[in-house]
Image: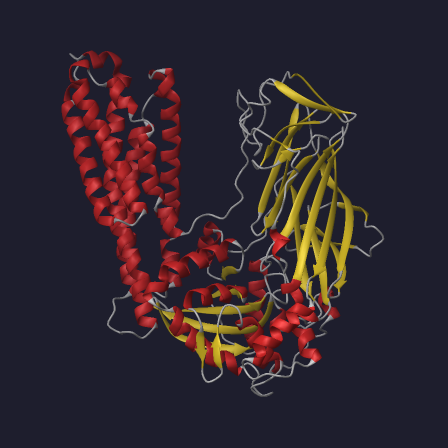
Amino acid sequence: MAKDSREIKLDPEAEKIDLRGKTFKKKRIKKKRNVISKKDSPIHSVKDLSGDKKYNYIYIRGKKFTPPKHLGSILRIGVAGFLIIMLINVINVYFIGKSIQNDLEATAHQGYSYLLDAGKSATKIQFDNALEAFNKAQGNFQDAEDDLWFINSDMSFYAQEGDIAKAVTGLLEGGKHFAEAGKWFLEAVEEFNNIPLYFVSKNAEITRDVPSITDSLKVGLERVELAIEEISIASEYISKINENSLPPELQARVIFAKNKVQEIAETLEETKMHFPAILKLLGDRYPHRYLILLQNNNEIRPTGGFIGSYAIVDVNDGYIEKLETHDVYDIDGSYGGLIIPPEEFLEFTGNWRFRDSNYSPDFAVSAKKARWFLEKEGGPTVDTVIAINQGLLRDMLEITGPVQVGEFGKLDADNYNLLLSFVIEGKVWGTENPKHILKVFIPAFKEAILKEENIGRVSSKLYKAVQQKHIMFYSSDAEVEALFDSMGVSGKVHESAEKEDYLSVINVSTGGTKSEQFMEEKITHITNIATDGTLTNEVEISRSHLWTDEVYLEWKNILGKYGFTQMPDHIIDILGRGENKVGMRVYVPEGSVLMDSDGKDVATMYDEDLKKTYFYIKMHTKAGETSSVNITYTLPFKLDMDPVDTYRIIVEKQPGSRGSIFNKRVTMGEEVYNLALHPEDARLKMDGMASYSTNLVYDQYFAGIFAK
């Protein structure tokens, strides 16, 4: 793919919007006949971009549309909580008696400083330093409390301001309990950090004399529970502070701290609820069986790619007891029944099978169907289904370096895709078992990747892959599925809120070629806001096939090094040169009405599982050519700009996609003007059009406040 396919340039004439509202607090921009003018605005209170609350000043901020952090990041929220207390440490100085002010100021401030140091150390996994800092913080808070023993005495001048005395007590006691929680968290994280080492040692067969992973996890979780208890106590102390008794300049800080501490406590309590699910995944009481779908996203499908192979994995007590890989055609070929496929699949199959089970972009829907097919065709019952796209293998090979595959040679990040595909599609190792190379490669790859020095880099790559929907999880166990939902890894399609726009372009390969790796997709989505609030969308989608003769020469050079001198045309076509044929689904809000499709044959369909309308188009693109479609439709809701309303849209990327080029535009009718935009790099151009461009490697959220 061309290197410049990811280089998005915003309009150089566009003017950046101040999301804090300073630009529009007293002024507004009115568009009329392409002339920009400013005048006083009567609006002093507007909704934020999430549309939930009102403020007495304009402060615009949209909701982040990103998946929650993984468990390790959630646990470190406790450390973040310690830093929050730093924001209000000046309160201690204000309330301490004049006669001992200097001494106590130094003591209390030092306590919070130690918390800050502890947080930094814990983030860097410098546990010894962090533990020492937490201990010092505890000591300093205790010293400050001892020096303020008299604040509850009726004879002291503090008794006249009881709320102030309580504020001092709340802050000091809260700080002590946060410090104690930090110590428990560190012990937990140390225990958790041992788990990958145990896993690698056992599964790489370095040694069998390693502790139980689930036992180690239980110890860590017990420490987390103790930390959560301490944070809850700290939250109680801080929540009792009456901010109304404080000076105005300190009230906002206390309110902010109270809210954040409460959020942390609630998040950790919710995390605690998922501990049993984590143990189930590791096979604590009973072995846990996984179905891993190995998807080739060069042949794009709704959840990522075509299911060419799959693995059955049994995990017991945290360790892999069995790992078997299978060719999907073996189990599909052994079943003789007739299963009618979805209407869209009739173009390439008349009998539905396991290999085509990932028919829905919602992974929970597709995973349930995959489990059903596996059992229907004689396979085992599984507990959890995981989809992994082949593109992830490139990231892993960048970590391991070249992997020796028997006497065949070495596979690396640059050649594995071509070599594996050529050997399998060309049946180089025999027609009876064309995927035998995988049975040789997988054990060698497992040995190369399961090394202690790779743990950190592998974790980072996996986390990124989850965020980009190259890995997704589903479980038939309700507790485990709830854990996947909370972590944002379940691959479920976004459930649209009221008056919320939505877009997701899902391509389903119907041609049987691996040409998606050469496709560049551009999506332009334009929303027009009429004076009466009517919303009309126009979406233009173009797909360019970037295969060239230079690719052929590169392939010929690589294959020649492995003794392959002949490249049959039909194999070249299968590997990427062939015509790219997809059935395209353009998902939009339920009830959207098609107005125009620039002469193309576009069908309006409804997805019962997702409760969304979608437009279906067949798009075929030959090498070196570009295909496109332009669709215009109206949304089933309007904006109520009396005085203002928020337009918002969720744009979801296709799982397995390498990322489309996405352009968002908003045009406005007469008398309609924009107050603010999200995200921060969205622009308001000189002609009054709102503009935003990005690479759709992650799901995106766009919003704006409009008035008339």
Residue under the point 40% across and 62% down: 281
Q: Camera-side residue: 411 or 139?
A: 411
Where 145 falls versus 164 (above or below)? below
- Along the line of sight, the residue nearer the viewer: 395 or 228: 395
Residue 543, percent from left and from top:
71, 57
Decide if residue 402 is on the left or right side of residue 429: left
> Can residue 424 be spotted in the picture?
yes
Q: Residue 63 in the image: state x and y as whole percent.
A: 53, 38
Q: Give the left or right position of residue 522, taking residue 393 as reference.
A: right
Which x, y percent locates residue 32? 76, 24
| Between 349 and 627, the one nearer to me in the picture | 627
Residue at 53 percent of width and 55 percent of height:
468
Quadrant of the snapshot with the C terminus: top right
Instruction: State how the image is colored.
Output: secondary structure
The residue lying at 47 percent from left, 73 percent from top is 312
Q: In this rendering, would 304 be left or right of 235? A: right
- On-image quarter of the N terminus: bottom right
**Spot occupied by residue 511 in the image (x, y as percentages of width and height):** 71, 70
* Location of residue 231 (image quadrant): top left
Instruction: Using the rendered image of the protein, determine whether residue 386 is visible from the camera's viewpoint.
Output: no
**Residue at screen point 70% across, 53% down:** 586
